[in-house]
Image: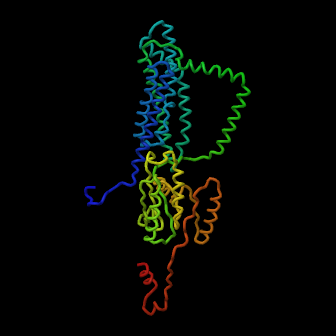
Amino acid sequence: QPSLPDGVVAETLYSRSYLVEETISTVRENLVAGALLVIVILFAMLGNWRGALVTAAVIPLAMLMTVTGMVDSGVSGNLMSLGALDFGLIVDGAVIIVENCLRRLAIAQKKKGGLLSLPERLDVTRSATREVLRPSIFGVTIILIVYLPILTLTGVEGKMFRPMALTVSGALFSALILSLTFVPAAVAVFVSGKVKERENWLMVQAHNLYRPVLAFALRARIFIVCVAALLLVGAGLLASKLGSEFLPTLDEGDMVMHALRIPGTSLSQAISMQSILEARVKELPEVRHVFSKIGTADIATDPVPPSVADVFIIIRPRSEWPDPRKTQATLIAELESEVARIPGSRYEFLQPIQMRFNELIAGVRSEFAIKIYGDDLDTLVDIGREVESLLQATPGSADVQTEQLTGLPMLTVTPDRTRLARYDLNVADVQYTLST
């Protein structure tokens, strides 16, 4: 900015740092909230604060081992990989071992009639760990097997989901190692006081509530089974109408709109139409900035004629919207109704990063594309219209459009070979002059 002349201001209109910061903030909040929730439940349910502290220590230690493995193996830490971590699964094996160690320590203290020495505690915890060794390993192994098919994914799916599978598998394996080594040793060292084998107050209250419900269910078992069957059938009907999606669309916050005009539209005409379009978009209160990019013919990876414009729509934070509860789909519908009043263009709505990924993957901006090949342009246009009509009638389809292939003004020059011969010129000279 200091190097610019007076009256010229450098202002950032589109920056992906906002989306990155929001994503990192979401991951951070999820990890912290998940860890705190698990730790609170551990202290409430185990009934021994030292045992709960040992179990909770598995979370940061397992995360440290996981992150170390991610750095060494080059696995990216992103919304998918870190957001998929479940601390409840991570401490699952440790909870089993700690509970059995506490039970065995209580029995040993009662049998001895006093506190145990460190060698005695180490012997008891070693024996208690061996008792539950198989179910602990078996439980973690089942979860790890679930993630093995994800490791076989390739292409875009592999790049997106393999880091998640590797991260979760690393965290579970790290937690398993800690459960078999650190946890029993820590219990033996730190749980040196008196240990009682009893249920805590929370579990007692839960049992008091559960027993009458269980007794009623056993008495009215036919009624309970019928209600459960009806709920199952109802859930199946609802599930059949939900549809499915391989990966939910990430809300980037900003939008990009393609204005597609008749091929051969001049640059001056495109600029004039674009000015009208931007003025109409700016009328929406949720829009902060609007700027456009008309034609990029010199870019080899994305050649676009002046008849196509990329309109970047920068959205205000939701706190500044008149209705913060409005969804992005509703905003796009309102935007589409506004720009539809401007004649001469067709519009496609995407998000900036989503648009670039679609272009890099398939060479088209849309989520789904059908390419038809042939050497007869008129036949291709007719087939394209038939495919478009079929797709528009397909349930679930939206915003089906065929690329504009016709309507381009053309100038045909037919050389007069007789006159060319009089001037001692050939066809190549004429073609070279015309191309220049």
7 displayed left or right of 269: left
Furthest residue toward right: 222
Quarter of the N terminus within the rendering: bottom left
101 displayed left or right of 244: left
Image point (65%, 22%), residue name = 213
Q: Is residue 434 or residue 117 the one in the foreground?
A: 434
Residue 362 appears in the picture as rendered: no
Query: Residue 87: horizontal and vertical position, in percent?
Result: 48, 32
Q: Is residue 157 or residue 202 the one in the foreground?
A: 202
Q: Is residue 275 above or below residue 434?
A: above
Query: Residue 171: horizontal and vertical position, in percent?
Result: 47, 34
Q: Is residue 175 or residue 339 the one in the foreground?
A: 339
- Indicate the quadrant where residue 373 lies: bottom right
- Indicate the quadrant where residue 382 lies: bottom right
Image point (64%, 42%), residue name = 239
Residue 399 appears in the picture as rendered: yes
Image point (50%, 60%), residue name = 363
Q: Is residue 321 above or below residue 267?
A: above
How was the colour assigned to the protein in this rendering?
rainbow
Quarter of the C terminus within the rendering: bottom left
